[in-house]
Image: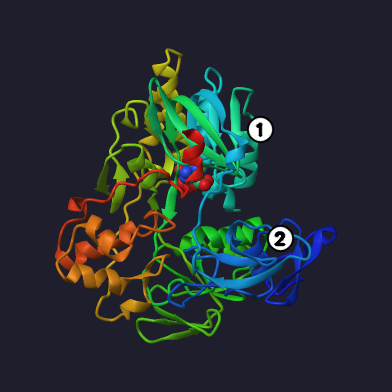
Amino acid sequence: MRPLDLYEKDASKKVTIYFEGKALEAYEGEKLPVALLANGIYWITTSLQGRKRGAFTFGPLPVVINGIKNIDGRKTLVKDGMRIERQNYGEFQEAVEIDGSKGVLREVVDVAIIGGGIAGIGATLELQEYLTVALIEERGWLGGLMSLRSTIQEGFDEEPKKVIEELTSQFNENVKVFKGTIALGVFDEGEYFLVPVVKKDQLIEIMAKRVVLATGAVENILLFENNEFPGVFRLDFALEVINKWGVAPGKRVAVVGRKPERIIPELEKWNIEYIVVPNPKRVEGEEKVERLIDTNGNVYEVDAVIVSDYRLPDINPITQAGGKLKFKWGYYVPVLDEQNRIREGIYVAGSAAGIKPHYANFLEGRLVGAYILREFGYEATPAVYKEKLEEYEPEPMPMQRIEFKDMNLEDVQICGCDVNLKKVDDVVKKGITDLQIVKRLTHLAMGFCQGRFCLFNGALLVSQRTGIDMGKIDLPVARPPLKNVRMKVTAVRE
Ligand code: ATP
């Protein structure tokens, strides 16, 4: 077994890959950064400012593969003989590539559901008896965050994997599932909504009478020094390497963040040694995490750090589709009407509407499905779901205080695109508090994540430096496409 494998892998799939010339054991179809991690390699790319980066925090992962530069390592599956070299960000532009010569496919359905997490699955199940559905999921699998967990979740009586399998096996012929497919936005087109999606390099235009945004939530980026150093894991990535790929994040792991209970059961299940450090100040090491220092000066020798904090609704799909935001429960949520709509025809379900347990998000998916059925004149009982949902008030998030004085702000990354806390703070201290202008001056929210991870901390900084209430801060609206697309697509559409 490789140093960080949690169990034996299928020997018939064993292959050899080369990283910086060194031969490594890997398994056909394994995700590239996971294969490297299993071999103890964390540092994979270097940011424009020369900061070492791994695959499991934020920012892009450009690598050279078989001599070809600028390949996103995070989306690459290993093949026998693959040669991988480190690369820095340089000219790298993460983009959804579309082959113009293939032409555009078109799909017409009653309802397009963006996001195949538990909320999207709930909505699909509710709708499928009477209406046609396109379920669009960026990842190669359904079930979202819940499918990455291995312990039984409140409200369900089996392991998440089983629950998802059972629910999705009930999909009927009215449901078309688009896995590995990115929705680029929602646009009005006469009586329909146009949802352009990309599957590999194929553009598909989905025309739908109604849209459900079940786009989920993102992990809050915790602010401490070197918070994107190789070996620091965002919670969803930690869950993915453990439960999807059977690889440990490290031999001895520090859990930081305000919600350690989100990861501890998984670490215990796999006997991964861990220590909880509630007050991280700085991560240090040569090529990967070697130690964590807390705000009291205690030093912990660890080889990985998992950030287990709160989640925040992904606000980009909401604002792009024309929704407004409000500040409630300590984060930004969409303003919804009585039927969970941001505007006529566009519904929101699941974590995208507020952070709550998976089961509540499932119920909310079903609720939204029931509202749509009723709108189309079919028999439905939204009131039943609504009543059950009332037991689950979204979870409030306490405000994180930014320790301006005690931190080296240059080492605290606020955004994966080389925007550190100092860069943003310097602008705000000059009296510029309009996030739209802060964005232009610092490039915050202008890069790869398009703000979904970094805008919140931008707003937090403005609020704490100026005393302006978070609810009064105007967040820039996400522009389409939700993911970068090469311009030749537009040319194809005329
Ligand atoms: P829970 O928060 O309880 O896990 P949920 O269904 O509300 O349930 P997620 O589990 O985060 O939320 O699932 C949301 C899914 O939406 C994710 O699997 C994510 O990949 C997908 N998604 C988000 N944006 C897009 C997009 N633009 N195109 C396709 N899929 C998307």
The reply, left or right, for residue 249 in relation to residue 380 is right
- Going 54% across and 22% down the picture, which residue do you hit? 132
Q: Is mark 2 within 8 Å of ligand 1?
A: no
- Where disc 2 sits, the SS reads loop
Quadrant in the picture for residue 219: bottom left
The residue type indicated by label 1 comes to Ser
Residue at 47% over, 72% down? 47
- Disc 1: residue Cβ within 8 A of ligand 1's nearest atom: no
Nearer to the camera, 374 or 209:
209
Q: Which mark is residue 169?
A: 1
- 473 vs 108: above or below: below
Mark 1 or 2: in front is 2
Q: Nearer the viewer, residue 251 or 185?
A: 185
Which residue does the numbered mark 2 point to in the structure image?
78
Rendering quarter of residue 61: bottom right
Please indicate, yes or no, whether residue 358 appears anywhere in the rendered image.
Answer: no
Task: Return the residue nearer the eye: 197 or 387.
Answer: 197
Q: Position of residue 254 (x, y in %)?
A: 50, 74
Cα gap from disc 1 to disc 2, whole angstroms: 29 Å
